Image (cartoon, rainbow, N blue to C red):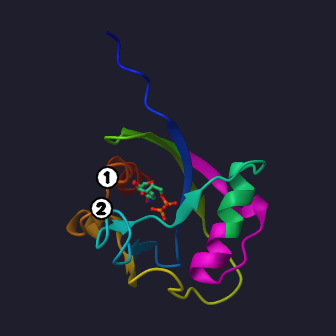
Amino acid sequence: MTDAPLPTVLVVAVALIDVDGRVLIAKRPQGKKLAGLWEFPGGKVEAGERPEQALIRELKEELGIDVSENCLSPFVFASHAYDSFHLLMPLYLCRRWDGVVTAREHDGLAWVKPIKLSDYPMPPADEPLVAWLRDLL
Ligand code: CDP
């Protein structure tokens, strides 16, 4: 018997980068899957959305900031097979936004130098992205 393929979930994520070259990570809240782990902000792409639209919506909901689409640069793609689904997660870079970054849905936020990102436990899908960012920044 062959195993049925896992459902695929498309999540978009972003590395917000400040003027000092630090990257924003956000702590997943209690009560959610992977609570307490630090992730690159973002979320699921909903039906009918393009990934960039989903990211702009999520950044407003989660962090209270406004981002315009031409400030989002696609960077790398994460792909991870969790037990019950296969996550595909493009990571964008963004250096410009309007508003003050505020934790509306997370348990905390941290601005972290890329070299220090590995001190923060992350979901397995996010971990490979750290090395890419370290090489870039
Ligand atoms: O809020 P909920 O966990 O339902 O959804 P989400 O945060 O939009 O992400 C869906 C799933 O993707 C999460 O449950 C995680 O398993 C995974 N995920 C991840 O591995 N890394 C991220 N940066 C975001 C989500």
Q: Image check: 96 left or right of 75?
A: right
Residue 53 is tagged as none
| Quadrant of residue 64 within the rendered picture | bottom right
Up/down of 18 relative to 135, above or below: below
Which image quadrant shows ligand 1? bottom left
User: Disc 2 marks which residue?
Assistant: 122
Q: Amino acid at mark 1?
A: Glu
Task: Please tell me which residue is depicted at 72% across the width and 71% down the height of the picture.
Answer: 67
Q: Are marks 1 and 2 in contact (CB under 8 Å)?
A: yes
Mark 2 element type: loop
Q: Image check: 112 left or right of 54?
A: left
Residue 94, percent from left and from top? 61, 65
Up/down of 3 relative to 15, above or below: above
Q: Is residue 69 magenta?
A: yes
Separation of marks 1 and 2 at Cα, in angstroms = 6 Å
Mark 1 element type: helix
Q: Residue furthest top?
A: 1
| Quadrant of residue 63 within the rendered picture | bottom right
Residue 117, percent from left and from top? 30, 66
Residue 99, percent from left and from top? 68, 88
Residue 28, percent from left and from top? 38, 72
Task: Please tell me which residue is depicted at 68% across the width and 50% down the height of the picture.
Answer: 51
Task: Please tell me which residue is depicted at 57% across the width and 85% down the height of the picture.
Answer: 101
Q: Amino acid at mark 2?
A: Met
Q: Is residue 95 magenta?
A: no
Which range of residues does the magenta coloring cover?
A: 58-75
Pick the quarter of the image with the C terminus: bottom left
Up/down of 5 relative to 62, above or below: above
Any atom of ligand 1 within 8 Å of the CB at mark 2? Answer: yes
User: Disc 1 marks which residue?
Assistant: 127
Q: How many residues crowd around disc 2 within 10 Å: few (fewer than 14), some, or many (20 or more)?
A: many
